[in-house]
Amino acid sequence: MATPEFLQDYAKDYAAQSKGAYSVPIDTSTFTGGQDASGNRLTGTAVTGANPFVAGEDALQTQAIGLAQQGVGAYQPYLTAAQQAQTNAAGTIGGLGALQTGAQGFQTAQAGATGANAYQPFMSPYQSQVIDATLSEFDRSRLGGQQNIRDAAVNSGNFGGGREGAMMGQYNADSLADRSALQAQMLQQGFGQAQQQAQQNFANQGQLFGNQGQMMQNQLGIANAQAGLGQAQLGLSDFNRSGIGADVGALGQLGSLRQGFNQANLSANQQAQQTAAYEPYGRLSQYGQGLTGLSGGVASQSYQEPQPVNMLSQSIGTAMGLGGLYGKIFQPGFNKA
């Protein structure tokens, strides 16, 4: 179909603009690519630097990562202290056996310190010698009295008579009674002292048994305290990990939020530059559509402008999703298969 005469100048103008636009490659470096160490833009296969349209790591994210690295293994001192406390508790409990054996020994000794013959071990081994010596002295002291009776009988002229015999018999009977009483007194005294010592021994054994039992209770208390210390150290270990995890999570998510805002701004700039790069093609397409319509031809599909994307919500949503990983670093089972 021939172009109407009144459109021929417009057609030539459209052809000239199209040739000028399509003969020059689009500079995609304005909305793609990275940068080198000096900040120069890189394109194509040479892109090795940071992408100018990708938000870099936020300072809070850097701090969160550093804190997370410091927190790796930070629980170990608490775990070591807990293990040592448990070892000490086990050793303390192990020592209860010796104390229990000692307590049983005192209990057995106390049981043996009872009964009718419990006093015998405390009787003096020299008691019989003391009694014999005392009685011998008593007997010698009574000889003088016998002599006095004989002398009185001689002086009265009754020596060998019945009166002398009666007086001597009474004196000897009294002496024997006094001798028996003295012997019984000494035996009773020795028995009483032995009985007191046996009772004291019984009380002492009971006290020793009680002391040993108290030592066992004290030892058990120490073991429980050591075990409690171990549990406390384990609690500190868990608190250390959870506390670091909470800090890392807070810093990471706040940093991700700021990174999302930065990314939204960079993405909007990228979209604006991309739109500007393709804007001439859109105008030419509309220009050509108009000419085709005026010449009576069938218009082809018109050029579609890229639809704008809500970069803010998209970037923040992505960043916050990734930011949630920070809070899970020290959660139990996070790195398990």
Image (cartoon, helix red, strand yellow):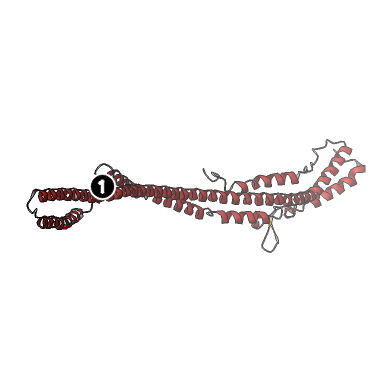
Q: Front-most of 219 and 150?
A: 150
Residue 51 appears left or right of 99: right
Residue reaching furthest bottom? Answer: 38
> x%, y% of residue 91?
39, 51
Task: Find residue 56 and report its image quarter.
Answer: bottom right
Q: Amino acid at mark 1?
A: Tyr
Residue 291 appears left or right of 61: right
Q: In terms of secondary structure, where does tag 1 sit?
A: loop
Q: Is residue 34 above or below residue 333?
A: below
> x%, y% of residue 210?
38, 47
Number of labelled discs? Answer: 1
Q: Residue at x 32, y 49 (%)?
A: 200
Regarding residue 112, the answer to whether it shows in the image is yes
Which residue was labeled with disc 1?
119
Regarding residue 57, the answer to whether it shows in the image is no
Residue 273 appears left or right of 63: right
